[in-house]
Image (tube, rainbow, N blue to C red):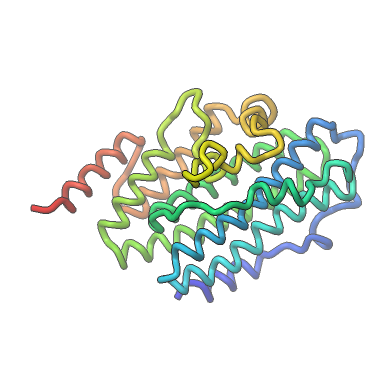
Amino acid sequence: MLYPELYKSLESVRWDMEKDIPWHAFEATQLSDEQAVTVKMNAITEWSALPATEMFLRDNQHDSDFSAFMSVWFFEEQKHSLVLMEYLRRFKPELVPTERELDAVRFTFDPAPPLETLMLHFCGEIRLNHWYRRAADWHSEPVIKHIYNTISRDEARHGGAYLRYMRRALVQSGDLARAAFAKIGVLMASRRGSERPLHPTTLHVAKSVFPNDTIQARLPDPDWLDRWLDEQIRFDDRWEMKVVERILHNLSLLLGRTFASAQELNRYRKEINARMAPQ
């Protein structure tokens, strides 16, 4: 089982919200109303770890090891939401999300193939790590800069944990896992021009409530994420390429093949699919 080892490794670097966040260093003049609103939106977005965990537990009932790991992932992701809300409670109490706003991002996701979902969330953690690093650069207020840098490191560690389960899946499922990881990798590593970024919070996940079935669509301001990325933290092509490079680098190590582009990964995907096709 991976869970006991992952628990120990994540526990050893766990931060304390009271002791490790420098609340005393807050500088009111360095926080604009515009910046504070983005903190609120990210707090609500992080709350969506709740329905994601419910999805993971439902779709992985066959896998007690991974399901147990969800106890750690869920705790740390909800703490991200909590620390952002605590920041607002202390310094911008009028912007603390309401329960109704938090409830809006909790809804039932349609069942999905576990291997594809695992790969999707691995890529999502890489993307969040880079988004939050960029957010820390954009902010000038010291406490929220510290918070974003702190939670960005958590996202990187979560990505590493997912990668461990992906390695295990290769042993257990072979080409089924390779095909699933390559399929999602191609989608996540393709340069998409002006299209919105692929991330679990931007994807449609429940046909019964389409098109209101993305986390982004259920935010108080559904246009916020695009504005945050394009106009505020300026997550430009250079930063997008960092995400793509990390995805391709990790898949290269995982699959034992060098992928310099999404096109090369797509050729590998076709190769695996052809190998799996009935003869």
What residue is at 85 percent from the left and 35 percent from the top? Answer: 31
Q: Residue furthest front?
A: 208
Residue 260 on image: x %, y %: 35, 37
> Which residue is more in the foreground, 211 or 195?
211
- In the picture, measured across the screen, residue 122 lies left or right of residue 85, that is left
Residue 28 on image: x %, y %: 91, 38
> Which residue is more in the foreground, 53 or 101?
101
What residue is at 76 percent from the left and 42 percent from the top? Answer: 40
* Labels in figure, total: 0
- In the picture, measured across the screen, residue 260 lies left or right of residue 39, that is left
Residue 173 on image: x %, y %: 29, 63
Above or below: residue 264 compared with residue 8? above
> Which residue is more in the foreground, 237 or 54?
54
What residue is at 41 percent from the left and 45 percent from the top? Answer: 249
User: Does residue 148 show up?
Assistant: no
> Which residue is more in the foreground, 240 or 42?
42
Residue 108 on image: x %, y %: 55, 54
Above or below: residue 234 compared with residue 204? above
Q: Quadrant of the N terminus?
A: bottom left
What residue is at 23 percent from the left and 42 percent from the top? Answer: 270
Q: Quadrant of residue 267?
A: top left
Q: Quadrant of residue 42?
A: top right
User: Does residue 58 show up?
Assistant: yes
